[in-house]
Image (tube, rainbow, N blue to C red):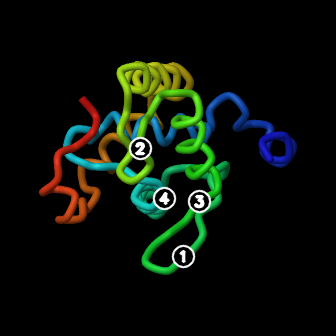
Amino acid sequence: MATVIWKLYPEERQTILHPEQIIGVIISTIAREVNWDSDLLAKAIKFLKDGGINTKLVDIRNAPGGYWSEEVESFVTRLILFGFATRRKPIEFTKKGVKLISEINWDAERRNTIEVKKIEKLMRGFPIPSVNQKRRAFFP
Protein backbone atom coordinates (compact mmCIF):
# COMPACT_ATOMS: atom_id res chain seq x y z
CA MET A 1 0.00 0.00 0.00
CA ALA A 2 2.86 2.43 0.80
CA THR A 3 4.17 2.31 -2.78
CA VAL A 4 0.77 3.35 -4.11
CA ILE A 5 0.56 6.21 -1.60
CA TRP A 6 3.99 7.52 -2.63
CA LYS A 7 2.91 7.55 -6.29
CA LEU A 8 -0.25 9.47 -5.38
CA TYR A 9 1.42 11.87 -2.94
CA PRO A 10 5.16 12.06 -3.82
CA GLU A 11 5.63 15.38 -1.99
CA GLU A 12 4.70 13.71 1.32
CA ARG A 13 7.14 10.81 1.09
CA GLN A 14 9.61 12.32 3.54
CA THR A 15 7.13 13.84 5.97
CA ILE A 16 4.18 11.45 6.32
CA LEU A 17 4.35 9.24 9.38
CA HIS A 18 4.05 5.48 8.96
CA PRO A 19 1.39 3.58 10.93
CA GLU A 20 4.00 2.19 13.35
CA GLN A 21 5.30 5.69 14.02
CA ILE A 22 1.83 7.07 14.71
CA ILE A 23 1.14 4.15 17.08
CA GLY A 24 4.51 4.65 18.79
CA VAL A 25 3.82 8.33 19.42
CA ILE A 26 0.31 7.55 20.71
CA ILE A 27 1.59 4.93 23.16
CA SER A 28 4.55 7.06 24.29
CA THR A 29 2.42 10.13 24.92
CA ILE A 30 0.01 8.66 27.48
CA ALA A 31 1.42 5.16 27.99
CA ARG A 32 1.34 4.97 31.77
CA GLU A 33 -2.31 5.95 32.01
CA VAL A 34 -3.80 3.49 29.52
CA ASN A 35 -4.02 -0.24 28.93
CA TRP A 36 -3.70 -0.24 25.16
CA ASP A 37 -5.25 -2.82 22.89
CA SER A 38 -5.79 -2.77 19.13
CA ASP A 39 -9.36 -1.44 19.43
CA LEU A 40 -8.32 1.49 21.60
CA LEU A 41 -5.34 2.25 19.33
CA ALA A 42 -7.68 2.33 16.31
CA LYS A 43 -9.99 4.67 18.23
CA ALA A 44 -7.01 6.92 19.08
CA ILE A 45 -5.94 7.05 15.42
CA LYS A 46 -9.51 7.98 14.41
CA PHE A 47 -9.39 10.69 17.09
CA LEU A 48 -6.15 12.02 15.56
CA LYS A 49 -7.57 11.86 12.03
CA ASP A 50 -10.60 13.88 13.17
CA GLY A 51 -8.15 16.33 14.76
CA GLY A 52 -6.40 16.97 11.44
CA ILE A 53 -3.44 14.58 11.59
CA ASN A 54 -2.39 13.03 8.28
CA THR A 55 -3.21 9.32 8.66
CA LYS A 56 -3.40 8.36 4.99
CA LEU A 57 -1.39 5.18 5.56
CA VAL A 58 -3.76 3.89 8.25
CA ASP A 59 -7.11 2.56 7.12
CA ILE A 60 -9.66 2.97 9.93
CA ARG A 61 -12.99 1.19 9.56
CA ASN A 62 -16.13 1.26 11.63
CA ALA A 63 -16.61 -1.90 13.66
CA PRO A 64 -19.15 -2.99 16.25
CA GLY A 65 -18.35 -1.03 19.38
CA GLY A 66 -15.77 1.29 17.80
CA TYR A 67 -13.13 1.19 15.10
CA TRP A 68 -10.80 -1.37 13.53
CA SER A 69 -7.55 -1.10 11.59
CA GLU A 70 -5.62 -3.81 9.78
CA GLU A 71 -2.40 -1.83 10.26
CA VAL A 72 -2.92 -1.68 14.03
CA GLU A 73 -3.78 -5.40 14.23
CA SER A 74 -0.69 -6.24 12.20
CA PHE A 75 1.55 -4.10 14.41
CA VAL A 76 0.21 -5.67 17.63
CA THR A 77 0.63 -9.15 16.15
CA ARG A 78 4.26 -8.39 15.26
CA LEU A 79 4.89 -7.07 18.77
CA ILE A 80 3.79 -10.40 20.23
CA LEU A 81 5.39 -12.56 17.54
CA PHE A 82 8.84 -11.00 17.99
CA GLY A 83 8.78 -10.82 21.78
CA PHE A 84 8.10 -7.12 22.26
CA ALA A 85 4.81 -7.84 24.06
CA THR A 86 3.39 -10.83 25.91
CA ARG A 87 -0.34 -10.07 25.81
CA ARG A 88 -2.76 -8.68 23.25
CA LYS A 89 -5.63 -7.32 25.38
CA PRO A 90 -4.33 -5.22 27.00
CA ILE A 91 -0.94 -5.08 25.32
CA GLU A 92 1.69 -6.01 27.90
CA PHE A 93 5.08 -4.74 26.74
CA THR A 94 8.35 -6.47 27.58
CA LYS A 95 11.44 -4.36 28.35
CA LYS A 96 12.43 -4.90 24.72
CA GLY A 97 9.00 -3.60 23.70
CA VAL A 98 9.33 -0.44 25.77
CA LYS A 99 12.70 0.21 24.13
CA LEU A 100 11.21 -0.43 20.68
CA ILE A 101 8.38 2.05 21.26
CA SER A 102 10.92 4.66 22.39
CA GLU A 103 12.99 4.07 19.24
CA ILE A 104 9.91 4.29 17.02
CA ASN A 105 8.93 7.53 18.72
CA TRP A 106 12.45 8.94 18.25
CA ASP A 107 12.37 7.98 14.56
CA ALA A 108 8.98 9.65 14.12
CA GLU A 109 10.28 12.85 15.71
CA ARG A 110 13.31 12.78 13.42
CA ARG A 111 11.06 12.34 10.38
CA ASN A 112 8.44 14.97 11.21
CA THR A 113 8.79 16.86 14.49
CA ILE A 114 5.87 19.18 13.79
CA GLU A 115 3.40 16.31 13.20
CA VAL A 116 4.66 14.46 16.31
CA LYS A 117 4.11 17.56 18.45
CA LYS A 118 0.57 17.89 17.04
CA ILE A 119 -0.14 14.24 17.89
CA GLU A 120 1.21 14.66 21.42
CA LYS A 121 -0.92 17.77 21.95
CA LEU A 122 -4.08 16.11 20.60
CA MET A 123 -3.53 12.93 22.62
CA ARG A 124 -3.62 14.92 25.87
CA GLY A 125 -7.32 15.44 25.08
CA PHE A 126 -8.00 11.81 24.15
CA PRO A 127 -10.95 10.47 26.16
CA ILE A 128 -9.57 7.50 28.09
CA PRO A 129 -12.26 4.89 28.85
CA SER A 130 -12.94 4.73 32.59
CA VAL A 131 -12.44 0.95 32.67
CA ASN A 132 -8.81 1.47 31.64
CA GLN A 133 -8.21 3.98 34.41
CA LYS A 134 -8.96 1.40 37.10
CA ARG A 135 -6.60 -1.29 35.81
CA ARG A 136 -2.84 -1.25 36.11
CA ALA A 137 -1.17 -0.15 32.87
CA PHE A 138 1.26 -2.64 31.34
CA PHE A 139 3.81 -0.13 30.09
CA PRO A 140 6.52 0.22 32.75
Q: Secondary structure at mark 2?
A: strand
* Residue that carries the numbered disc 2 in the rendered image: 87
Q: At x 45% / y 61%, what residue is drawn?
A: 39
Lower sequence index among marks 1 and 2: 1
Crowding around mark 2 (Cα neighbors within 10 Å: few <14, some 14 to 19, many 20+) is: some
The residue closer to the viewer here, 121 or 75, is: 75
The residue closer to the viewer here, 140 or 67, is: 140
* Residue that carries the numbered disc 4 in the rendered image: 42
Horizontal side of residue 32 vs 22, given as left or right = left
Give the Cα separation between the discs numbered 3 and 4: 6 Å
Which kind of residue does numbered mark 2 sit on?
Arg
* Residue that carries the numbered disc 1 in the rendered image: 63
Q: At x 67% / y 49%, what residue is drawn?
A: 57
Q: Secondary structure at mark 3?
A: strand
Give the Cα separation between the discs numbered 1 and 3: 9 Å
Which kind of residue does numbered mark 4 sit on?
Ala
Crowding around mark 3 (Cα neighbors within 10 Å: few <14, some 14 to 19, many 20+) is: many
- x%, y% of residue 2? 78, 42
Lower sequence index among marks 4 and 1: 4
Q: At x 48% / y 58%, what residue is drawn?
A: 42
- x%, y% of residue 125? 25, 55
